[in-house]
Image: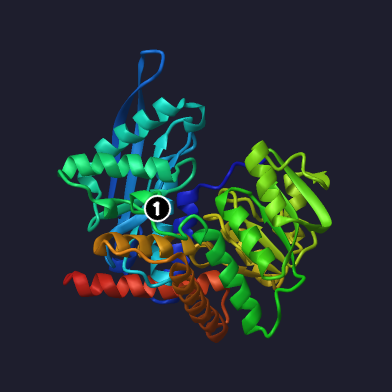
Amino acid sequence: MPDKPNTWDIALRQFHEVAARIDLSRGLRDYLSVPEAVHVFSVPVLRDNGETQVFTGIRSQHSFARGPAKGGLRFHPGVSIDEVKALSMWMTWKTAVVNVPFGGGKGGLICDYKSFSTREKERAARGFARRLAPVIGPEIDIPAPDVNTTAEVMAWIADEYGHYVGHPEPACITGKPVEFGGSRGRDSATGRGLAYCVDRYYHNKDRSLEGQHVVIQGFGNAGQWAAKVLASMGATIIAISDSRGAVHTPDGISATGAVKHKLESGEVAGMPGEEISHEELLELECDILVPAALESCITADNAPRIKAKLIAEAANGPTTPDADAILHERGITVIPDVLANAGGVTVSYFEWVQNRQRYYWPEEKVHQRLQATMRQSLDEVQALAEDKDVPWRTAAYMLAIQRVAHAVEVNHPDF
């Protein structure tokens, strides 16, 4: 099996290709091709056996040009500085695509968090929060949940930050439980935002989602909500997968039934249907493919065999640049991650606004504003892609990089 592409190399390649296309100045290219800050922390954690183990925590703040840095925290053994830097850069473009006033950030704790006991999880999260506190805050950098982190983890971090500043400050982080200042509708936002994008794509082509066949790779929060909302719009889910297995049912899978099974059993395996490999799932005949797992699953190796007509990226960076070129040549439209999965950061922005105002919105208002944002953003990216005759990812990056570059020029007299 070939080595997994370096995520930071991919992010840089994507940036430089578009920067050259829009004739970005050398100074701006150099400035935006590195994070404004990368913090690395040692995080001691008392284990239940009485021993203290030291883990490494990272926070990359790619850009403050359009506002505070914004992005998730992932607790996973595979976290690396290069991965976190890439994800923070992608967050800069993502917030710019949907035009919310944030920059890009990302962080992680290198640990096998799933293996921790509940008490160890809390100690690790609070320990990391104490190291993060001096470099985050409502006007500086606003973390959020990501791989293996939950609303409860966000509440622990917010509590530690409150102790650091001497008063409660819910706007220091998003993705919190509703009772601790979280926004209604945040749990469904990433998958729901993707569904709004797909629905708008079909609307703009004067077509209906009714009966469209959908394959979902990755059945965590984003994949589950994408399945439920797309199914409610009339689409038919024909295959789903998680890290342990994949199931294919050509006649359709009940989205609510699949979510129930996953929550009860912890896995997709065991559901009615034909069990297939992860490779086979990606290459199924379908109308819409939703990659909702980790990075670089669609590569130059399997892109020639992808049969979906539309790919909507729920995961960050699931398609490599070489695969992008192949898909474009084959006429397969990709709604890129910086647009398709931006529902999460959009509702995170709504949560931050509500926290700052101490005034909270009903869930229906959150859904309406999310839908309006995703529709407008998709329309802007589609119009630019068609006007310039470029792939949607290129159009999204052109739009985002121009917005960020303009903010840098306004804020920094040296540019």
- The answer to whether 232 appears left or right of 410 in the picture is right
- Characterize the local packing of mark 1: few (<14), some (14-19) or many (20 or more) Cα atoms within 10 angstroms: some
x 45%, y 50%: residue: 8
Residue 99 shows up from this direction: yes
Residue 322: x percent and y percent? 61, 59
Q: Quadrant of the N terminus?
A: top right
Residue 132 shows up from this direction: no
Disc 1 target residue = 178
**Quadrant location of residue 413?**
bottom left
Q: Residue furthest top?
A: 50
Q: Quadrant of the C terminus?
A: bottom left
Residue 263: x percent and y percent? 63, 42
Q: Is residue 74 above or below residue 257?
A: above
**Quadrant location of residue 235?**
bottom right
Residue type, mark 1 in image: Val
Q: Is residue 233 above or below residue 227?
A: below
Q: Is residue 88 above or below residue 41?
A: below
Q: How many marks?
A: 1
Quick one: SS at disc 1? helix
- The answer to whether 136 appears left or right of 387 in the picture is left
Residue 375: x percent and y percent? 52, 77
x 52%, y 58%: residue: 188
